[in-house]
Every structure is written in structure tokens, then in C-alpha cells.
């Protein structure tokens, strides 16, 4: 069967190759599920793996099949697989697999303290940009048929879900905490999906991003009944003064400068969730005393979040269903750029480099 892979450590090595079709017996104990891949989203992670910035091949291989945002249909199951995963069921596989820490052993590998991650399509495990894969049933989340056209958004949505779910979990300390207004920093895929998740929870949202409106991303924000503010037109402080205070702030930009600005404007008893991974060694001046005083006297929290648990994927399914009911057609507008078939793999990197639209995705099964 065909797959799109890279040779880790070798820049610009993405290629199409023939690989063996997986077998249910690859998963012991009768828990294997054979999945026919329908659609795979690609993003900056895939671009950076192709640039050889990170990623390792599975043991015994000199290539890594990429692709972690996935949607497929169950083709066959092992003898001990639960009935909810019968053939024909739409499924999404989670990305990270357990390592050796105590958190991994209790099913919280997204909170691992290990330095090495086992992630499908990213590090040490083959991904989903292929025709079929086999997975342990424990790592598959079923979706209703109504989500067939937008289910590929579940994995990126799970990132937003985890950050928001963690914020609510942390804020249980306040007994009666109920965020009235939130700010989402960034209007890319994760930022838009975080805005959606918060709106579905009844929170007023300001999406703060670089682009000047109107353009597709700002229009999508406004279709959710949220407010779009461009950083070209207002500072975070000005946005907070006009639309806040911000009880919850979700950062999805990868800009450390914006993080420290957010730390200054976060409301008392607020929580700032950081999901953007920054690279390099940028140095900036910050109002250190003001930020420190605000966090101490205001009982504020700053927390990092990465990856997602099964619970976050399941709550993401609920929000995809809710979005279809409350905002019909909104999710489909995120799927802006299609690569139609594995054979057109050469289109992937140019689309990502040009930042074509919002979500670039590959239709694997025609």
C-alpha cells in the first residue's frame, strides 16, 4: 500500500513509498482494529518534521510515515474489540502512546514526565498518511456518521479541548468560578477551534490576532458571535479594557511576547493557558514586577498544555456535534485546502509554506 513518509534527520526527504499493509495480529490480545484512512490533516508539525527539526523513525525502520490528524473507517476488528468499533464505524486515533512515567501508567500520557515521546506520525511511531493502519482499540474514538466530512478536525480540536478542560479543572479551587469573558490569542486552526469550544460553553470570546479584518478567519470568528480584534489596531490592554476583563485566556500563537502581554491583562482569579510551542532564543523586556504582583495579589494561574487525553477527544466529539447543530456549515469552512490523493504529495509542503487557507488536508480515500 502507499504511504507518505520522510527520512528523519534528512531535510526535505518527504516521499511516496510502498509499505506493507498492516495486520490485525500486529496488536496482541485480539484488540487490534484495521482502519481504512479517509482523510488526514497536515500542519506545521509535518512541515517541521520534513525540515528535519525533529522526529525519529520507529525501531528497525529508516523512514517515518507522517500525519497525525486523522479520520478513518473501521475495516476489520480483532476478536476482543468492543462492539462500538464494529466495521463501518468512523474513528479518530489519538496521537501519543504511553511511555514509562507514572502518568503514562494511568492513561495520562499527555501529562508524561518522560523526555522521549511516542507519538504517531511525529516520533518513533508511524502516522496516518497511508491507506490503512492498525491500532489498539483503546486509542480509537468513535464518531457518528454525521461527522464524516468534518471529523478530521477532531485531533486539532482535542488540543483546544484539553487546554480549556484543564483550565476548568484548575479553577475548581475557586468553587464558584464561571468565566464570563475569554480571550483567544491567534486565529489559526487551534485558535478558531478554541473560540468555538468556548462559545459552545456560553463564554463571550475575543479572538485577538494579527490579520486586519475582514478576512476569512475574522469572519468565522464573528459567525460564532465572538469579537475579532486585530493586533494591528489595538493592544491586548486596549482589548481587555474595551471587552474584558478576561477570566480565561488561551494562547495559540507561539509568540512569547504575546504571552507576557497576556499575563499583564489577565483578570484576577483568571487562568492563562499556553498552547503555542516557541522556538529560538528570543529575548524581550517585560514588566516583571507588575506581572509578579498581579499574579500574587490576583490569585492568577499560568499553565502550559500539550497533546490531549482520551477524555479531551470525547469532549471534542460532543463539541463537533454541538457545532453542527448551533453553527451549521461553520466547521466545513475551516477545510479550505485539499490535496486530492496520496499521489499528489508534492503539493503538501508548498501549501503549508504559503499558509494556504486554514486547514490543509489530504483526501486519502477517493
Image (tube, rainbow, N blue to C red):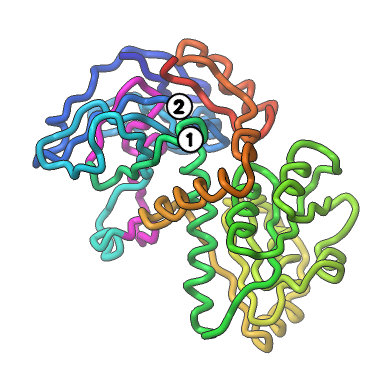
**Left or right: where does residue 201 sit relative to residue 363?**
right
* Quarter of the image where the C terminus is located: top left
Total labels drawn: 2
Q: Residue 228, can we see it?
A: yes
Q: Is residue 24 placed above or below 21 in the rendered structure?
A: below
Residue visible at 39% across and 40% down in the picture: 144
Q: Is residue 277 placed above or below 27 in the rendered structure?
A: below
Cα separation, mark 2 vs mark 1, equals 6 Å
Residue visible at 71% across and 68% down in the picture: 181
Q: How far from the left and from the top, in percent, is residue 311?
A: 38, 57
Determine the residue located farthest toward the bottom in the rendered image: 297
Residue 169: which numbered mark, if any? none
Q: Under tag 2, what secondary structure?
A: strand
Determine the residue located farthest toward the right in the rendered image: 233
Residue 236 quadrant = bottom right
Residue visible at 63% across and 64% down in the picture: 202
* Quarter of the image where the N terminus is located: top left
Q: Which residues are magenta?
A: 108-136
**Left or right: where does residue 1 sit relative to residue 12?**
left
Residue 346 quadrant = top right
* Magenta stretch encompasses residue 297: no
Residue 152: which numbered mark, if any? 1
Determine the residue located farthest toward the front in the rendered image: 325
* Disc 2 target residue: 39
Q: How far from the left and from the top, in percent, is residue 57?
A: 33, 32
Q: How far from the left and from the top, in percent, is residue 29?
A: 9, 42
Mark 2 or mark 1, earlier in chain: 2
Residue visible at 62% across and 25% down in the picture: 337
Mark 2 touches mark 1? (CB < 8 Å): yes
- Crowding near pointer 1: few (<14 within 10 Å), some, many (20+)? many
Q: How far from the left and from the top, in percent, is residue 173?
A: 50, 83
Amino acid at each position: 500500500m502507499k504511504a507518505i513518509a520522510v527520512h528523519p534527520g534528512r531535510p526535505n526527504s518527504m516521499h511516496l513509498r510502498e509499505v506493507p499493509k498492516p495486520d490485525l495480529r500486529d496488536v496482541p490480545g485480539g484488540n487490534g482494529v484495521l482502519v481504512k484512512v479517509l482523510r488526514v490533516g497536515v500542519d506545521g508539525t509535518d512541515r517541521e518534521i520534513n525540515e528535519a527539526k525533529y522526529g525519529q523513525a520507529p525501531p528497525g525502520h529508516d523512514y517515518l510515515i507522517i500525519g497525525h490528524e486523522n479520520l478513518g473507517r473501521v475495516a476489520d476488528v480483532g476478536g476482543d474489540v468492543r462492539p462500538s468499533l464494529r466495521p463501518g464505524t468512523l474513528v479518530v486515533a489519538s496521537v501519543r502512546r504511553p511511555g514509562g512515567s507514572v502518568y503514562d501508567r494511568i492513561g495520562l500520557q499527555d501529562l508524561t514526565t518522560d523526555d522521549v515521546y511516542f507519538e504517531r506520525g511525529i516520533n518513533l511511531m508511524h502516522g496516518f498518511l497511508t491507506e490503512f493502519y492498525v491500532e489498539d482499540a483503546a486509542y480509537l474514538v468513535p464518531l457518528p456518521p454525521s461527522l464524516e466530512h468534518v471529523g478530521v478536525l477532531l485531533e486539532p480540536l482535542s488540543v483546544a479541548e484539553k487546554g480549556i478542560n484543564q483550565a476548568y479543572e484548575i479553577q475548581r479551587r475557586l468553587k464558584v468560578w464561571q468565566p464570563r469573558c475569554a480571550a483567544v490569542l491567534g486565529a489559526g486552526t487551534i485558535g478558531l477551534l478554541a473560540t468555538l469550544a468556548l462559545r459552545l460553553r456560553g463564554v463571550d470570546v475575543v479572538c485577538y490576532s494579527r490579520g486586519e479584518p475582514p478576512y476569512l478567519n475574522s469572519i468565522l470568528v464573528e459567525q460564532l458571535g465572538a469579537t475579532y480584534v486585530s493586533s494591528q489596531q489595538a493592544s491586548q490592554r486596549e482589548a481587555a479594557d474595551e471587552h474584558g476583563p478576561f477570566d480565561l485566556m488561551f494562547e495559540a500563537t507561539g509568540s512569547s511576547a504575546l504571552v507576557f502581554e497576556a499575563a499583564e491583562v489577565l483578570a484576577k482569579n483568571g487562568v492563562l493557558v499556553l498552547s503555542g510551542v516557541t522556538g529560538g532564543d528570543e529575548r524581550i523586556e517585560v514588566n516583571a514586577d507588575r506581572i509578579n504582583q498581579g499574579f500574587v495579589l490576583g490569585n492568577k494561574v499560568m499553565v502550559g498544555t500539550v497533546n490531549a487525553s482520551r477524555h479531551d477527544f470525547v469532549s471534542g466529539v460532543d463539541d463537533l456535534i454541538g457545532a453542527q447543530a448551533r453553527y451549521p456549515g461553520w466547521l466545513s469552512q475551516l477545510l479550505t485546502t485539499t490535496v486530492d490523493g496520496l499521489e499528489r504529495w508534492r503539493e503538501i509542503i508548498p501549501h503549508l509554506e504559503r499558509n494556504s487557507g486554514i486547514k490543509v488536508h489530504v483526501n486519502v480515500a477517493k
